[in-house]
Image (spheres, grey):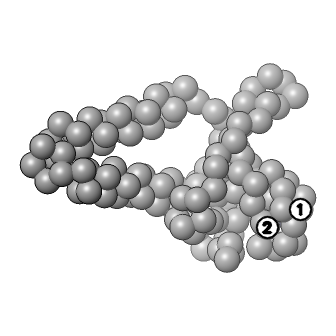
Amino acid sequence: MARFIPRQADWWGTVWKLLFFLAVIVFAIAVIEPRRGIFWTALFILGGLWVFVSLMSRKGGYKCGKCGRPFQVPTLVNFFTVSQVGKNDDGTYYSYKKLTCPYCHKVSKARLMKLSEAKGEGRLLK
Ligand SMILES: [Zn+2]
């Protein structure tokens, strides 16, 4: 059984994400654009984003806000859904997405979780 631990909103994680995007975009505009044109630049930025999102979806999962069961989402779903930030009662923040749970089939605020162990039995959202 895969185990999930709640993920705290950490500043360094956010800073790294921003730096990654910035690096991809700067590299694309400075190196690729003058040589290959805007099409390849856009493609590169999109590709970088895709790799990033797929890494993120492999590393984490989401916990259903209705039934509390953890599940993972495929890259495609992760790519086209927006991450939102909610506030806990104790003043800390958490990240969530509006997702349909693969177990109870209800749309809820699914909290971002860190996948701490092997991803054996987590059912994939379709
Ligand atoms: Zn559920």
**Label 2 belongs to which residue?**
101
Does 121 sit above or below residue 66?
Answer: below
Looking at the image, which residue is at 48% across and 55% down? Answer: 53
Q: What element does badge 1 sit on? A: loop
Residue 39 appears in the rendering: yes
Position of residue 106 measured from the top left corner of the image (x, y, whole percent): 87, 66
Which image quarter holds the C terminus? bottom right
Residue 68 appears in the rendering: no
Does 8 sit above or below residue 99?
Answer: above
State yes or no: Cβ of the residue under disc 1 lies below 8 Å from any atom of ligand 1. yes
- Which label's residue is closer to the chain start, 2 or 1? 1
Circles 2, 1 touching at the beta carbon (< 8 Å): yes
Position of residue 28 measured from the top left corner of the image (x, y, whole percent): 24, 44
Q: CA distance from mark 2 to mark 1?
A: 9 Å
Looking at the image, which residue is at 84% across and 56% down? Answer: 108
State yes or no: Cβ of the residue under disc 2 lies below 8 Å from any atom of ligand 1. yes
Residue farthest toward the top in the current orientation of the protein: 91
Q: What element does badge 2 sit on? A: loop
Looking at the image, which residue is at 64% across and 49% down? Answer: 82
Q: Quadrant of residue 34?
A: top left
- Local packing at callout 2 (Cα closer than 10 Å; few below 14, some 14-19, many 20+) is many
Q: Quadrant of residue 70?
A: bottom right
Q: On residue 67, which mark appears?
A: 1
Under mark 1, the amino acid is: Cys
82 displayed left or right of 48: right
Which image quarter holds the N terminus? bottom right
Position of residue 22 measured from the top left corner of the image (x, y, whole percent): 35, 34
Does 37 sit above or below residue 10?
Answer: below
104 displayed left or right of 76: right
Position of residue 2 measured from the top left corner of the image (x, y, whole percent): 65, 65
Nearest-to-viewer mark from 2 and 1: 2
